Amino acid sequence: MAEYDAFFENLQEVPQDEEIRLVIRDLTPGRAKYRCQVVRAKVSSEPSKYPERLWPRLGRGQWVGEPWSIRVVEEVDPIPEAWR
Amino acid sequence: MAYRYYKDNREFIEALRATGDLVTVEPEVDWDLELGAIVRRVCELQGPSPHFKKIKDYPGFEALGAPLATYRKLAVSLGLPAATPIPEIGRAYVERTERGEPLKPRVVDRSRAPCKQNVWTGDDANLFNLPAPMVHDGDGGRYLATWHMVVAKDPDTGEVNWGMYRQMVFDEKTMVGPVLPFSDMGKMFFNKYVPRNQPMPFATVIGMDPLSGVAACAPSPIPEDEFASLLMGEAVEVVKCETSDLLVPAHAEIIIEGEVLPGVWLEEAPFGEYTGYRTSPRERRTVYRIRAITFRDNPILTVSNMGVPTDEGQLLRSFSLSLEMEKLLRSQGIPITGVYMWPESTHHLVVIGTRHAYTGIARQIANLVFGSKLGPWFHMVVVVDENTDIYNKNQVIHALSTRCHPVNGIHVYEGDVGTPLNPFATPAERRMGKGAKVLFDCLFPRDWQPSDIPILVAFDTVYPQEIRDKVLANWKAYGFSE
Ligand SMILES: Cc1cc2nc3c(=O)[nH]c(=O)nc-3n(C[C@H](O)[C@H](O)[C@H](O)COP(=O)(O)O)c2cc1C
Ligand SMILES: [Mn+2]
């Protein structure tokens, strides 16, 4: 199971179970830890609803401690093609 | 004439070691928080700079923490004795930058530029091949650029800017960071490149010589590559980039080349900031796309850990902001006696001493400095008379607490330029970069009768000279040790 975290200004306002754009960080240990990616994904506050783990943080980096779950639908390249 | 200075970070490391301001850390440290925590503690203790010899996951890379976070280290960087008093360090800065002729940098061949010893392009130009630390737990990402400079050029005038603009690693090829719209690079990028939809070539220089760093974080009115020559007394040696015609300091440790992209914004922050807080929100900010990385053998990454005082941003920006303010005020003929910012104010509070030459002088001083290019970076001006020692916290607190009238002496400025980093600003003000400012006028009004003006009761002010001389001469005889 992959583990990610993401920053949310307000957890109550996060749309659950619908496809949203968000930036997640890969927590896999090693040189690329904390790599960010823009994804389209579904998230849930239920820890076992989706296959991967998502640790929420609040807007100033506060660790929440209750795991959410995430299904990444696709990684989105945020850089327009002309400038890749 | 060249002053005594250090051509690269390595000579500076040896100089700091010689003055007892450096510790070599031999055990391996983890880039993920451990290294940052060590640097943080060093800042809070105002201790010697750690030179990390081994970094987990990154054999061959080294790091230097808190390179300039004390006045001792600043003095050493200027070739002065480490114990040089603050006003004297300030005098050296003002004299060198006012007296000398700024020199264009001298371009050297790449064979004489250590920063070209290793060149990564293509897939090798991968930001995860560099030991970017996770500086504080809870930061929005790994910050590769915390004590560095970003080189960019005006597309019309060709004028060069070196400035510090923090950069977070987003992915292999992408960094992201805030470029505030009133900074020199912000004005260049947002007013010129973005409207033309033109990518802006940049080069991030990490581990430059210390005086180039001082120049890059100074709010200099002239291009910083020439400003650095004023501090050194000779031209800076630079070399051409691999992928653009930008010039970078030849003796720096690591160069990251690429382009700043117009019209693309990615999430950056939160980050432990110079105010001592994580304040500015995670939001979409300026995107740096990288094309090449060049570096010296065994490169030494420089790491600043911003947080509660004292970090190098607080110390050096307090230093150069106040001295640039002093030059500005003097250039306008205002009879000031000095300008100082305590690093502990995180360069938010400036103390200005002046002769009370005419009514309204405190307002004139505040209007001038708030209205200048320096204005967005601070919001409290305390104006004291020429007899108050502006470097002496006790005297300034005493003056502020006794001479500033709560109604007549405090002047509030609303609707000013601010930054998203101000902890006191409302969330809405932070989003809009809106600020507010305040002047504390600690001058007794000139229209009071002389006999109405309170007399300062101090050893030096209320005893005749012969009594003071006698007391001082007999001090030990009275039984006092000091
Ligand atoms: C360590 C450090 C980090 C900084 N980070 C930023 C930043 O991310 N964005 C920004 O706009 N200014 C930042 N600043 C302030 C600019 O570097 C500062 O304005 C600099 O003097 C550039 O001045 P200029 O705009 O006159 O060229 C930082 C300063 C320091 C010392
Ligand atoms: Mn500048």
Image: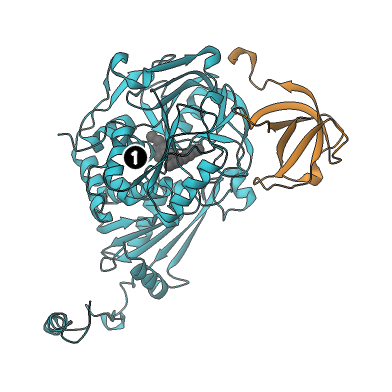
* x 31%, y 74%: residue: B447
Residue corresponding to mark 1: B214
Q: Quadrant of the C terminus of chain B?
A: bottom left
Q: Quadrant of residue A21?
A: top right
Q: Position of residue B16 (x, y in %)?
A: 30, 43
Residue nearer the viewer, B470 or B476? B476
Q: Position of residue B148 (x, y in %)?
A: 42, 34
Left or right of B157 on screen, residue B235: left
Q: Position of residue B119 (x, y in %)?
A: 43, 15
Q: Residue furthest bottom?
A: B478
Tint of chain B: cyan
Residue B327 lies, with reference to residue B477, above or below; the image says above
Residue B234 lies, with reference to residue B442, above or below; the image says above
Left or right of B106 on screen, residue B115: right
Tint of chain A: orange
Q: Quadrant of residue B479?
A: bottom left
Residue B145 lies, with reference to residue B472, above or below; the image says above
